[in-house]
């Protein structure tokens, strides 16, 4: 599949572009875990958006990612993941007890009850310890599986990025070969020429006309990384997001939020912006492309949800309604953290 030369070198961790005397950088930060009391132990991701003048940093701002804002809604994805987490916990405990060899466990844990002189009492304590340990492991079983799934998706994205930006020599692990080939085949079948892969974008509060770059910078309120933008057979702009997990309703809003933020590429990558400038910088279509991790004979190699331009525009407005919810939740977390810190310092 042919790709344009504009792809060469795109998709770094942070992107920089000199616009007159100003430079913007957009960089994803390391996810921060919320309190264990939060449902599903949510990871919160932010982006640092920095503004430079003559190579001197004059402003920096941390803004939430698109997916972090969507998590605040507690919608379709969260509800389904809660059920999945419960099943993972139950399955882990069931499997652990089905194969439990109490004698082996007693041997392993003997040192922990060495002070017990009565064998029956020691066995009782060990039984309780095994049950408590298994329950604790069960509680985190879904989290371990979630990390494995996310790691698979991240590796698949990385390989697709390398291939689509011109690195044909990239090593493709065996477990990713089918997924990567399916991603390339979908682009080929749709007649899409990629012009940017995994490019960070940010959104600015209206009005878009700004008095200064400092003014623009202060009105940035979310950021994210677009899996891909390209031109279709009619030379019109399209946007897509790869999914190796499930397709959830929030995925459409995620894509819409990215679509609404594409104008920021004017400040982060001029070559890509020039390639899409004739399209009015808003896609005519968005695609959620699900390529399943596990495949069996007879399955479709991919499943696609298509969102037209009108729906993308509408859903971008719906997404904006979630931003105040996220901010409120974030302020509550900060208040709770301050109370816990105060209690520790007082104690």
Image (tube, rainbow, N blue to C red):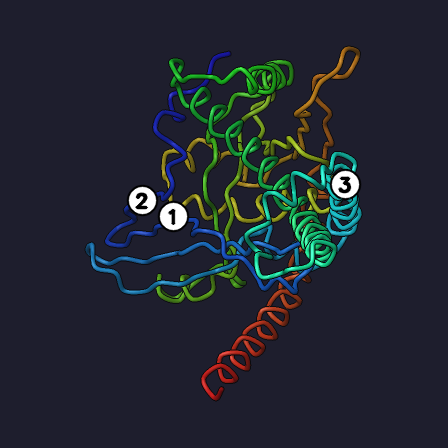
The residue carrying mark 3 is 97
Residue labelled with disc 2: 17
Dot label at residue 267? 1
Viewer-proximal residue among 30 and 230: 30
Determine whether the residue tagged by mark 1 lies in a helix, strand or loop.
helix
Q: Which numbered disc, 3 or 2, marks the residue that appears first in the sequence?
A: 2
Q: Residue furthest front?
A: 117
Residue at disc 2, secondary structure:
strand
Task: Name the residue at the bottom extreme.
Answer: 346
Q: Is residue 219 left or right of residue 68?
A: left
**Residue placed most toward the observer, 50 or 286:** 50
Q: On screen, 237 above or below 80?
A: above
Left or right of residue 137: residue 346? left
**Who's the residue at 53% across and 27% down the image?**
156
Q: Confirm or deny contact between disc 2 and disc 1 (CB under 8 A).
A: yes
Question: Residue 134's x, y, as percent?
Answer: 69, 48
| Image height of 168 relative to 114, above or below | above
Which of the two discs, 2 and 1, labels the residue nearer the N terminus?
A: 2
Q: How packed is label 3: few (under 14 Cα within 10 Å), some, or many (20 or more)?
A: few
């Amino acid at each position: 599949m042919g790709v344009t030369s504009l792809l060469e070198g795109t998709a770094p961790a942070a992107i920089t572009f000199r616009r007159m005397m100003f430079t913007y950088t957009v960089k994803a930060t390391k996810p921060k875990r919320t309190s264990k009391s939060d449902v599903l132990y949510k990871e919160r991701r932010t982006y640092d958006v920095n503004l430079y003048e003559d190579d001197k940093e004059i402003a920096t701002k941390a803004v939430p990612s698109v997916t972090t804002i969507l998590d605040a809604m507690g919608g379709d994805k969260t509800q389904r993941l809660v059920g999945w987490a419960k099943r993972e916990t139950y399955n882990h405990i069931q499997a652990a007890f089905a194969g439990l060899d109490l004698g082996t466990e007693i041997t392993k844990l003997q040192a922990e009850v060495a002070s017990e002189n009565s064998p029956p009492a020691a066995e009782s304590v060990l039984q309780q310890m095994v049950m408590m340990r298994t329950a604790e492991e069960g509680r985190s079983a879904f989290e371990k599986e979630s990390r494995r799934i996310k790691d698979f998706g991240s590796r698949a994205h990385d390989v697709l990025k390398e291939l689509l930006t011109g690195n044909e020599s990239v090593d493709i692990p065996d477990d990713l070969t089918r997924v990567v080939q399916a991603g390339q085949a979908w682009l080929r079948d749709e007649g899409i020429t990629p012009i940017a892969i995994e490019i960070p974008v940010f959104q600015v509060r209206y009005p878009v006309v700004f008095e200064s770059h400092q003014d623009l910078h202060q009105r940035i309120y979310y950021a994210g990384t677009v899996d891909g933008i390209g031109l279709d057979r009619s030379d019109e702009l399209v946007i897509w997001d790869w999914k190796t997990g499930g397709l959830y309703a929030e995925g459409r809003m995620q894509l819409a939020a990215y679509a609404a933020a594409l104008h920021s590429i004017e400040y982060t990558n001029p070559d890509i912006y020039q390639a899409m400038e004739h399209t009015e910088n808003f896609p005519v279509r968005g695609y959620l492309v699900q390529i399943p991790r596990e495949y069996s004979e007879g399955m479709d190699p991919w499943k696609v949800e298509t969102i037209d331009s009108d729906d993308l525009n509408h859903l971008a407005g719906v997404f904006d309604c979630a931003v105040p919810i996220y901010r409120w939740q974030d302020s509550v977390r900060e208040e709770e953290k301050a109370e816990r810190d105060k209690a520790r310092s007082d104690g």
